[in-house]
Amino acid sequence: MSKKTNTKFIIEPDKWVDQHGDYLYNFAFSRVYSKEIAEDLVQDTFLAGLRAMHSFQGRSSELTWLISILKRKVIDYYRKASTSKEIVATEFTKPFRKDGLYEGHWILERAPKEWKGDLADPINRAEFRKILEQCLNELPENWKAVFVLKYIDDMENKDICKELECTPTNLWVMLHRARLKLRECIEMYWLR
Amino acid sequence: MDKIMLNCDQATLLATQNSVDKIGCVKKIQLNLHLMGCKLCRTFVKQTNQITYELKKEAEMDADNLKLQLTVARKQKMKTEMEKG
């Protein structure tokens, strides 16, 4: 199933799965932190790539081109997951006092504690990343989406808001709460 | 005084904004002033920076050293789906 495009570049979809499957899989996983979802996104990417073969112009490598399709699939996934009406509202409240003289101050029981262990040590790092993955998956999908799209893909706020249908203020609220919840979750597992 | 001195809720929000966007001189000074006097928020900043660092490192792709692998069965399924479509 080799095909020459009219610009003389060869595109070989029958080699995609073997040549690029694992790379795309790792890329997808690092954005969605679920093996199942990552697998589905990779499959969707290959199928979309097949349909769009005629538009491949050899300006980038096949892999780069496939990655750009995958990135779009990731955003689509997060958009659907974030705007779905079945979003479970989290019970997370911010760890700050709500009223009184010390309004806005840390609630002491929930305030950051020192984390022991040097993360440069590979064993600690592996443990930390396992916990990070676990805690990311405990975030509501829309918070996770904002967090990933912002910190890994450096997406601009306005683009994130367009995709996830939020306002810039919503976005900061979600990002703030996501970071607070994530940090608290990681601390809980790390200090066990 | 309320408008100048941030509380920790405001400071951590600013720290988050500062980690991804420009927040401007005034807010930066406010944030740093708060951090100078608040160990808890300093710890928050240190820890969330660590989290961001590890997250980004995880997302770095090394083609020669891929952590995860699709199973043979899953690859076969993908090929089958591609042949259909």
Image (cartoon, coloured by chain):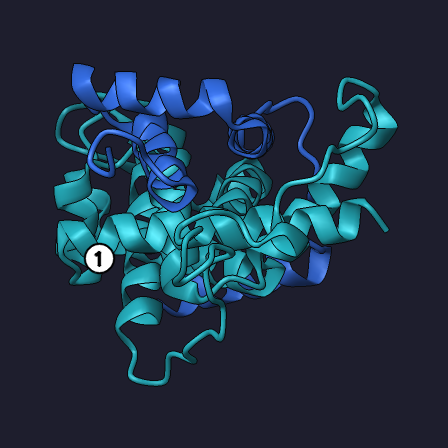
Residue A46 in percent (x, y) is at: 39, 52
Using the rendered view, name the quadrant where residue A173 is placed.
Answer: bottom left
Can residue B56 be seen by looking at this rendering? no
Parent chain of label 1: A
Disc 1 residue type (three-letter)? Asn
The quarter of the picture where residue B73 lies is bottom right
Please tell me whether residue A35 is drawn above or below residue B1 in the rendered image: below
Q: Position of residue A27 (x, y in %)?
A: 50, 40
Chain A, chosen colour in render: cyan
- Look at the image and tell me whether residue A97 can be seen: yes
Q: Who is closer to the viewer here, A144 or B7?
A: B7
Crowding at label 1, few (<14), some or many (≥20) Cα neighbours within 10 Å?
A: few
The color chain B is rendered in: blue
Question: Which residue has dot 1 on it?
Answer: A170
Residue occupying image coordinates x 58% and y 42%: A18
Disc 1 on helix, strand or loop? helix
* Vertical relation: A161 (above or below) A123: below
Q: Residue at x 86, y 51 (%)?
A: A192
